[in-house]
Image (cartoon, rainbow, N blue to C red):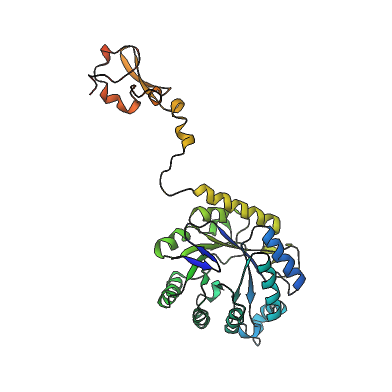
């Protein structure tokens, strides 16, 4: 099943599509946000993603255990005007702009902006009211699977399939940062084998290695936290990629995709050009027939190659040197 993002149609064979997850790294500051979007474009992103919410609608303000979380999100809450400013900046730069709705009213806001897709956060793959609202929007959904149990992923997929929702499924591990020995990239071929979705990777590990390997395993959509500067004040800057590292990721993904080549055993002309020196023909040496380099048969079709040893028969009557076809060859 192909996956559409605006004018783009992604397939399982598409080049990597790289999303800069700005999230809260705009610091609720239009100037910082716009500069971050511009740097994401410069660093090789195809899209920028934000988070959209009214804090009171997804965090209980009366629960003291999550007051710190409520305060963080309230600090970085964006209004509609800020969304529109960031969207305009992204579109003017040729970037796709979308966001993660964390409450139902956020879906309405994003639909009002006519974003091309909605992103479902890992924690909301079990949130049926928000999934229902998102499905009702008619938008394609990018769905992360971090921290979800296998049966929870299966349940969400069944719901989305029943509603005939266009989906891109992201493998994700909800650890910040994710140790490389816990990235579990074999989930990507598992999703490819058990669904017909385009599959991607929301990468919370340090560096570019995990995403590069994921590309080789079939991931197409890649999401990585992005910031202007990892030392800026804010909750996510320290776990995000700066422009230099993000640019390296974009380049590594491009090369990883090119390394994949085409399915099957494909032989390049540059390889076959080396047959003369790397392969062997049959040579009569004394009383024996040996496989020796160079492969004279590549230039003279009357000389036997090393696979044709059984055609030689009794070598005693053969002249020294390359073995040629003869009427007595079997």
x 68%, y 64%: residue: 93
Tell me where residue 94 sits by quadrant. bottom right
x 67%, y 55%: residue: 245
Q: In which quarter of the image is the C terminus?
A: top left
Q: Does residue 241 show up?
A: no
Residue 140, given in percent of the width and then of the height, sits at 51, 73
Q: In which quarter of the image is the N terminus?
A: bottom left
Q: Is residue 32 left or right of residue 292?
A: right
Tell me how many marks there are: 0
x 65%, y 83%: residue: 54
Residue 249, given in percent of the width and then of the height, sits at 62, 55
Q: Is residue 60 positioned above or below 234 on the image?
A: below
Q: Nearer the viewer, residue 230 or 307?
A: 307
Q: Is residue 152 positioned above or below 46 on the image?
A: below
Residue 302, given in percent of the width and then of the height, sits at 33, 22
Q: In this view, does 225 lie to the left or right of 263?
A: right
Q: Is residue 82 left or right of residue 49?
A: right
Residue 238, given in percent of the width and then of the height, sits at 70, 64
Q: Nearer the viewer, residue 179 or 160?
A: 160
Q: Which of 304 and 327 is in front in this view?
A: 327
Q: Nearer the viewer, residue 46 or 122?
A: 46
Q: Is residue 199 positioned above or below 279 on the image?
A: below
Q: Is residue 81 positioned above or below 211 on the image?
A: below
x 44%, y 40%: residue: 267
Tell me where residue 7 sits by quadrant. bottom right
Q: Does residue 304 show up?
A: yes
């Amino acid at each position: 099943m192909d996956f559409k993002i605006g004018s783009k149609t992604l397939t399982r064979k598409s080049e990597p599509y790289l999303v800069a997850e700005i999230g809260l790294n705009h610091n609720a500051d239009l100037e910082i946000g716009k500069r971050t979007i511009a740097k994401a474009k410069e660093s090789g992103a195809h899209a920028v993603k934000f988070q959209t919410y009214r804090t009171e609608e997804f965090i209980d303000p009366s629960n003291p255990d999550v007051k710190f979380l409520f305060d963080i999100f309230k600090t970085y809450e964006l209004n509609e005007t800020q969304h529109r400013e960031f969207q305009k900046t992204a579109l003017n730069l040729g970037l796709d702009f979308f966001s993660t709705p964390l409450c139902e009213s956020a879906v309405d806001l994003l639909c009002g902006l006519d974003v091309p897709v909605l992103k479902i956060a890992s924690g909301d793959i079990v949130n049926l009211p928000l999934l229902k609202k998102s499905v009702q929007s008619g938008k394609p959904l990018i769905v992360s699977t971090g921290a979800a149990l296998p049966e929870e992923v299966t349940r969400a997929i069944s719901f989305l399939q029943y509603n005939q929702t266009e989906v891109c499924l992201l493998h994700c591990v909800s650890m910040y940062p994710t140790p490389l020995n816990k990235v579990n990239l074999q989930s990507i071929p598992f999703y490819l084998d058990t669904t017909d979705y385009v599959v991607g990777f929301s990468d919370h590990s340090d560096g570019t290695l995990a995403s590069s390997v994921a590309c080789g395993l079939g991931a197409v959509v890649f999401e990585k936290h992005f910031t202007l500067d990892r030392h800026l004040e804010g909750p996510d800057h320290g776990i995000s990629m700066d422009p230099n590292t993000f640019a390296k990721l974009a380049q590594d993904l491009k090369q990883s995709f090119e390394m994949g080549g085409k399915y099957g055993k494909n032989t390049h002309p540059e390889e076959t050009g080396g047959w003369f020196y790397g392969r062997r023909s049959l040579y009569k040496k004394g009383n024996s027939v040996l496989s020796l380099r160079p492969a004279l048969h590549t230039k003279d079709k009357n000389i036997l190659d090393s696979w044709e040893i059984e055609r030689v028969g009794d070598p005693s009557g053969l002249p020294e040197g390359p073995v040629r076809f003869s009427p007595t060859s079997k």
